[in-house]
Image: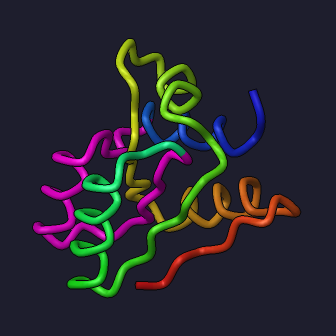
Amino acid sequence: MDKALGYLGLAARAGRLAVGAEDCADRLRRGVPGLLVSASDAGRSTLDEARYLAQARGRTVFPSRYTKRVLADALGRSGPVALVMICDEGLGAAFLKAAGGGHGNEEERV
């Protein structure tokens, strides 16, 4: 497992990770700060909802290189995971550094 996925697991164990579109949307609506991370194969409707919610709250959506299956495996989930939200500033920054370094992914400010 690579370092960025390790940070997702750490956030999950610390209770600082929202998993799935509904959980992420709920935390955004409640004003919880965090970084939205989308799977590379997330559906258009999921991405549109994430972008809309992020834009309304001045947040960031990070389009990761990880597929839904890779995200699910990293989190020990049986079903696919299209969207997660890291609800910790330090872990979010560490994830971005590990996931974005040299892979052509950049934050999408919406």
Looking at the image, residue 89 lies above or below residue 12: below
Residue lying at the far right of the rendered structure: 102
Q: Nearer the viewer, residue 82 or 8?
A: 82
Quarter holding residue 50: bottom left
Where is residue 4? Give x, y as percent. Answer: 69, 45
The residue shown at (44%, 75%) is 60
Please count the marks in the image.
0
Pick the quarter of the image with the C terminus: bottom left
Q: Position of residue 3 (x, y in %)?
A: 76, 41
Which stretch is magenta? 14-40
Compared with 45, 81 (above or below) is above
Q: Position of residue 101 (x, y in %)?
A: 83, 62
Q: Does 98 sit left or right of 102 as displayed? A: left
Residue 110 lies in the magenta-colored region: no
Left or right: 92 with respect to 99?
Answer: left
Q: Nearer the viewer, residue 98 or 62?
A: 62
Query: Residue at horizontal 67%, vertical 59%?
Result: 94
Image quarter for residue 8? Answer: top right
**Which quadrant does the N terminus fall into?**
top right
| Placement of 8 over or under 105, stated as above or below | above
> Is 74 left, or right, of 46 in this rendering?
right
Q: Quick one: which residue is furthest to the top in this view?
A: 78
Residue 71 lies, in percent from the top left, at: 53, 32
The chosen color scheme is rainbow
Instruction: Based on the picture, tell me whether residue 39 belongs to the magenta stretch.
Output: yes
Residue at the spot 53% in from the left edge and 77% down from the top edge: 108
Q: Residue furthest front?
A: 44
